[in-house]
Amino acid sequence: MNSLFARLLRSYVVVILTAIMVTGAALSYLYSDREFERTERELVEKGEQIAFYFAISSSLQPTQVTANAIAATAQALGVGITIADRNGRPVMTTTNIPMQSLNLRAQDVERVLVHGEVVTRRGYEEALGEAAVTALIPIKRGGVVVGAMALHTPTRGVLDTLRNALNLLIWAALLAAFAAIAVSYVLSRRIAAPIRAVTEATKAVAEGNFDLRVHTHDPGELGALSAAFNELAARLGQTVGELSQEKQKTSSILESINEGVVAVDRRGNILLANPALRRLSPSNPVRGSLKEHPTLSVLWPSLEQSLLGEVGPHSELRIGESILSIHVTPLKDERDEVQGAVAILHDVTERHRLERMRRDFLANVSHELRTPLTSIRGFAQAILEGVVASEEQGRRYLRVIMDESMRLIRLVNTILDLSRIESSAITLNFEPLDIAEVIADAADSLEPLSRDRDIEILLDIGPSPIIHGDRDRVTQVVQNLLDNAVRHAPKGTRVFVRSGPADFDGEPGVRIDIQDQGEGIPEDDLPYIWERFYKVDKSRKYERGVGTGLGLVIVKEIVQMHGGRVRAANVPEGGARFTVELPVKRSADA
Ligand SMILES: Nc1ncnc2c1ncn2[C@@H]1O[C@H](COP(=O)(O)OP(=O)(O)OP(=O)(O)O)[C@@H](O)[C@H]1O
Ligand SMILES: [Mg+2]
């Protein structure tokens, strides 16, 4: 049984019972009063009629006829009639109570017999031994009271009628109570149903389902409640929707940006961290206290400064391999109080790397330039100061100056070439290329050097597809690699050049192998030979092996511009092998 029903029922029953009891009490009071009055009136009326007999008779002792008439009246009315003399002593009675006990009371004698009043009363009569309505009527003869007549009727009859009425009332009350149960049940269901619907809907809203609506047809307060609830749910749904859309936007911005973002509260607990920040600490989850975070705790001092209201200097710090510039802003609430701080981390590793590269490059270039310049200056000075002993020596000095100048020019040209390639200032002239021709051209250009070093270049050109490429640049690639092979291998050795088809994930291409019989490249140096100015043999073992360390950088750049690949390896029989693979397609279409 739901409590609403119980409460409704209780109040209904209380109201109904109270109403019935009050009505019952009032009714029975009114009814009994009227009933008694009526009886009294009847008794007085009858009594006065009978008293009339005695007014015309000479004695209080009735005649047989009168006595019979009195007895008949008494029986018809259901009353007891007693006649008393002027002293209040009974002289005749229709009751079967002994006469002596029917004496009038002293105050009755006074009022009835002395003053000649009619007296009526209700209540317990000692003489009768029960409650009764009593009427005392003086018997007068010629204006003089000669006796009195008492008429009694027990109140039993009236009370019986009353009891019947009360019984009826009790039945009515019971009936009303049943009706109350039924009505309150129906009502409670009617009231409870919409309330329950609203309750259910409220729970749903609390769980985040704003689409639920309450349907009631109640025109009164419950209808208004449901309507208000529906309005509330709709507004809430709309507001929450808008909010979550905003949040979605913000978080997708945070997700997508490359800058790391972390927000903390006043105590340093992490409130938010975006994926870019989480990437800085792949091994430790980004949550809890930033102060105690194994990798990110370095951020705390900057954030703490901001929390304390100080504007921290724009600083850089290092997390793992990355160098990060950190920018911190305090998070303020609407009252302008600092509630937390947010740090934005910008990865400047690449910028640092480029700066370092530029510095290294400058240092390397200066170093490369200083050596030839120093020797040019030395020899020129010697000639100027006339320390040249012979013409032949003078010519030798001039040759050195010439060689070093050539080297300077070559170096500057190479640097310029490389910088043009790297800054994409050159455009490739793509044309169909037969790789066999390219190799033959390159080998021809290396002829003087190879003859000089007594090195034989052996070509093994297999059938391979025509590719699209820049003739001069591809020739430069083969030239640079052949130049290395000829210059970095000992005199009298051989260089093998092979070519054939290559495979680019199902796409056709060509492959060129250049292999020498020199010492190869130390395994430790292999990864670095592609870097600028990197030279394995810094002691310049071979006199002609003086290079800039830029040849392979140019090779790699050109090959990549053609969408190809290049790699170096040492061969087991001794010597290095460089392999270039170029696709048939132009790099732009690849
Ligand atoms: N075939 C090879 N055998 C042994 N070492 C080689 C070979 N090719 C390259 N190397 C090593 O790799 C280094 C880098 O080569 P790279 O061609 O870039 O520079 P370089 O030949 O010294 O100078 P240059 O700019 O004149 O070519 C060389 O200095 C050399 O030590
Ligand atoms: Mg070289």
Image (tube, rainbow, N blue to C red):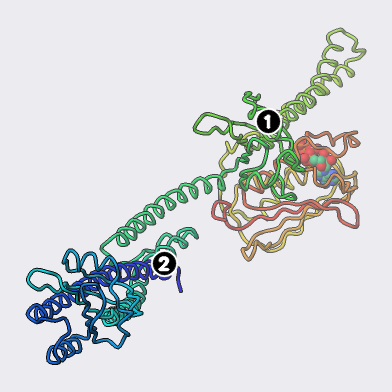
Q: Residue furthest front?
A: 58
- Locate residue 336 relative to residue 114 in the image: left or right: right
Callout 2: 10 Å neighbours few (<14), some, many (20+)?
Answer: few
Residue 426 lies, with reference to residue 519, above or below; the image says above
Q: Is the residue indicated by label 1 positioned so its CB lies within 8 Å of ligand 1? A: no
Q: Which residue appears at 53% of the width and 47% of the height?
A: 251
Which residue in the structure is indicated by mark 1?
304
Q: On the rendered image, what quadrant is the C terminus found in?
A: bottom right
Q: Residue furthest top?
A: 385
Q: Estimate the spatial distance between the alpha carbons at disc 1 and disc 2, rounded to whole Å.
A: 61 Å
Mark 1 or mark 2: which comes first in sequence?
Answer: 2
Which of the 4 quarters of the picture holds residue 29? bottom left
Residue 545 in view (yes/no): yes
Callout 1: 10 Å neighbours few (<14), some, many (20+)?
Answer: many
Q: Position of residue 126 (x, y in %)?
A: 35, 76
Q: How many marks?
A: 2
Residue 406 in view (yes/no): no
Q: Position of residue 89 (x, y in %)?
A: 26, 76
Which of the 4 quarters of the picture holds residue 539? top right
Report the amino acid beneath label 1.
Answer: Glu
Q: Position of residue 348 (x, y in %)?
A: 66, 35
Residue 432 lies, with reference to residue 297, above or below; the image says below
Mark nearest the camera among 1 and 2 is 2
Residue toward you, 373 or 17: 17
Secondary structure beneath disc 2? helix
Which residue in the structure is indicated by mark 2?
7
Residue toward you, 103 or 212: 103
